[in-house]
Amino acid sequence: MSRLGKWWRQAWENIHSPRRLVLVPGDSLPDQLPRRDLILARDGDEDWCVGMICPCGCQSKIELLVIEEAKPRWDVHFDNEQRPTLSPSVWLKTGCRSHFLVRKGRVVWCG
């Protein structure tokens, strides 16, 4: 992604309201994901995965495992306003090759 493209995407992200974390029951993601929000699949007391549409605009579905046994795995935290934070960063190795963080519901582009 060009420097101008990264600047534009970051500016666009900051104009919109923060992304929210939506809980769904079960151990898998629904077929349809919201355009901006993140989905957390939770079965009972156990979190399984987080899903989202790639913020670069390519419309790819991203699924990140948060279950303890998974490798690689991500941690997801959210504040009182349901704004998610993911760690570590998300770096897609194929397709659009986006690399970003999600902090308090905002996408922060890396690189």
Image (cartoon, rainbow, N blue to C red):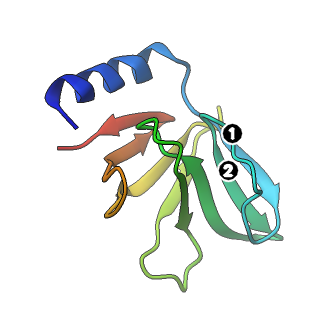
Give x and y (percent) for residue 39.
67, 50
Task: Name the quadrant containing residue 13.
Answer: top left
Look at 31% across and 64% down and name the residue there. Answer: 93
Q: Residues within 10 Å of mark 2 (few under 14, many from 20)?
A: many
Q: Which one is in front, 2 or 40? A: 2
For the residue marked with disc 1, what is the amino acid? Pro
Q: Residues within 10 Å of mark 1 (few under 14, many from 20)?
A: few
In this view, 6 is above or below 21: above
Give x and y (percent) for residue 46.
72, 72
Task: Name the quadrant containing residue 78.
Answer: top right
- Which residue is identified by label 1? 34
Look at 55% across and 80% down and name the residue there. Answer: 68
For the residue marked with disc 2, what is the amino acid? Ile
- Which residue is identified by label 2? 39
Nearest-to-viewer mark from 1 and 2? 1
Look at 35% across and 50% down and name the residue there. Answer: 96
In the drawing, does residue 28 fall left or right of residue 109?
Answer: right
Q: Are marks 1 and 2 in contact (CB under 8 Å)?
A: yes
In the drawing, does residue 33 fall left or right of residue 85?
Answer: right
Q: Earlier in the sequence, mark 1 or mark 2?
A: 1
Task: Name the quadrant containing residue 95.
Answer: bottom left
Give x and y (percent) for residue 56.
40, 37
In this view, 24 is above or below 80: below
Q: Quadrant of the C terminus?
A: top left
Look at 63% across and 38% down and name the residue there. Answer: 37
